[in-house]
Amino acid sequence: MDNVGYVGLSRNAGLMRQLDSVANNIANVSTNGYRREGNVFAEHIKALDGRDPSLSVSTLSRRFVDLSPGDVTTTSNPLDFAIEGDGFFLVETQNGQRLTRDGAFSRNAQNELVTSGDMRVLDDTGGAIVIPAQAKSIEAANDGLIFADGEPIGRLGVVTADPAGLVREGGNLFRAENGFDPAEAVRVRQFAVEGSNVNAVAELARLIEVQRTYEISQKFSKDDDERINRTIRVLGHQS
């Protein structure tokens, strides 16, 4: 394969990854706490021997998570919470502790506070938050301390993590590869849920742009393949 072929394959592979990210973002426009995914590309320049110019190839360097806040909606559910500032709710999954911004909580059969995916919401010590079955009122302070009928029952575990170490697991769930720490200077709002931070209009425009670029790149690669085939046929006739 010649240099043009390598460049075309590299570009097409990168565009496919971009399409995957954009499609995932659009699919999660209505997912509570979803964080938009973006891509960072790196350019590799290789000096070639002889008369040929250098070869420039772009490859996907990494994917990043856009941590800008989403819109917050006021609800009538006392078990709905939203975080103002940097931070994530700490939850327990079958694979260990994970992070999420989705604060649409409820109670399970054991009266434990759980996420919409039935994962236990953890307190600031890593334990479950149990709401007394007979509790008539649930209130929460700005620091995440929850009260049932005026008695404290636990403080929501809110943590921060290195953005570069966040690995997405599903729509709004993350694994913190570099660990996490208790969040500081954050405010927890009750009767509120944070939505996705995806701008649907901007993401659709991005989808169209990437699709068009991919189509052009595909045509470029096809034209180059035809050029190579013509050259082979000509050389075959001359031999």
Image: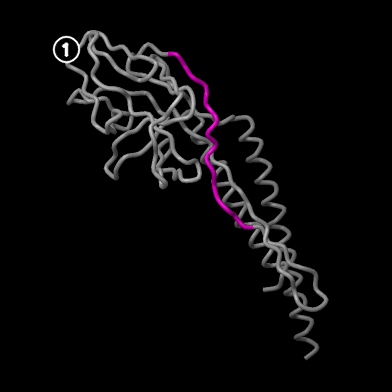
User: Residue placed at 66% from the left, 40% from the top?
Assistant: 208
Whether residue 228 sits left or right of residue 111 in the image: it is right
User: Residue placed at 71% from the left, 68% from the top?
Assistant: 46
Residue 33 at x, y = what percent? 45, 29
Q: What type of secondary structure mainly makes up the magenta span? A: strand
Near-viewer residue (10 or 121)? 121
Q: Please tell me whether residue 34 belongs to the stretch shown in magenta.
A: no
Q: Residue furthest bottom?
A: 239
The quarter of the rendered structure image containing the N terminus is bottom right
Residue 87 at x, y = what percent? 44, 30
Q: Relative to 221, is 72 above or below?
A: above
Q: Relative to 60, is 31 above or below?
A: above
- Tag 1: amino acid: Gln
Which residues are drawn in magenta?
59-74
How did the renderer colour the structure?
one colour
Residue 45 at x, y = what percent? 71, 64
Near-viewer residue (167 or 12)? 167
